[in-house]
Amino acid sequence: MASVLAPCALGREEELTGSDDLTVLDHKDDFMDAFGLHMQKTLRKRRQFIICANLQTAHHVTDASPLYHKLDFSGFLPHERAWLDRLFDEMGCVDAFRDLNKQSNQFTWWPEQTEGSRKNAGIRVDYQLLTPGIRKTVADGWIDDSTRFSDHAPVIMDYDIEIGN
């Protein structure tokens, strides 16, 4: 099990970061490319794993309120969503929550920039990524939107996994 936090570029896409002339979005894209390479390498080892991740990007239209469908900012850009297509479709990772719950309006983040929680303009950017070999161990899962430690709600997943001695 591991935890990953991708850089957030929401509302800062064009902002330069330091002397390298790269934007915040460029840094996020570089991180996602490196993480994708790491995932490919890790998946080749055929080990089973769970990665709890805030990838700062919603995958499908059902993972973002209509506000995000109309705006052109990081978190729902076509190239970011295409990266998730590769992760799930080509690399074979499993989105544990979406494997159980296909409903729309299942959000984990309500950005302050969009007054999201007031308007229920949320987006699902938090994931539990699984290898296919442990897909059948998912027993239950939900987003606990009544418990917020910040502008995020936790993704709770129950697994039926035997831990070896």
Image (cartoon, rainbow, N blue to C red):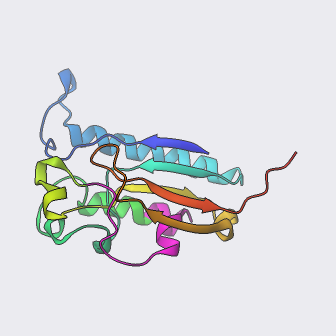
The correct choice, above or below, for 61 with respect to 159 in the image is below
Q: Quadrant of residue 92?
A: bottom right
Whole-percent x, y for residue 133 in the image: 70, 64
Name of the residue lying farthest toward the top: 19
* Range shown magenta: 86-109
Screen quadrant of the C terminus = top right
The correct choice, above or below, for 137 with respect to 27 in the image is below
Front residue (pair 12, 89)? 12
Whether residue 52 sits left or right of residue 139 in the image: it is left
Q: How many marks?
A: 0
Please check the rendered image and state whether residue 89 is part of the magenta-colored stretch, yes or no.
Answer: yes
Please check the rendered image and state whether residue 43 is part of the magenta-colored stretch, yes or no.
Answer: no
Q: Quadrant of residue 79?
A: bottom left
> Residue 150: in sight, yes or no?
yes
Name of the residue lying farthest toward the front: 146
Whole-percent x, y for residue 100 in the image: 52, 74
In percent of the image, x 12 and y 54: which residue is there? 114
In percent of the image, x 32 and y 76: which residue is there? 104
Whole-percent x, y for residue 33 in the image: 41, 46
Front residue (pair 87, 137)? 137
> Residue 95: in sight, yes or no?
no
Front residue (pair 69, 40)? 69
Whether residue 100 sits left or right of residue 13 in the image: it is right
Name of the residue lying farthest toward the right: 165
Whole-percent x, y for residue 51 in the image: 55, 49
Screen quadrant of the N terminus = top right
Whether residue 121 sits left or right of residue 96 in the image: it is left
In percent of the image, x 33 and y 61: which residue is there? 124
In percent of the image, x 42 and y 53: which residue is there? 154
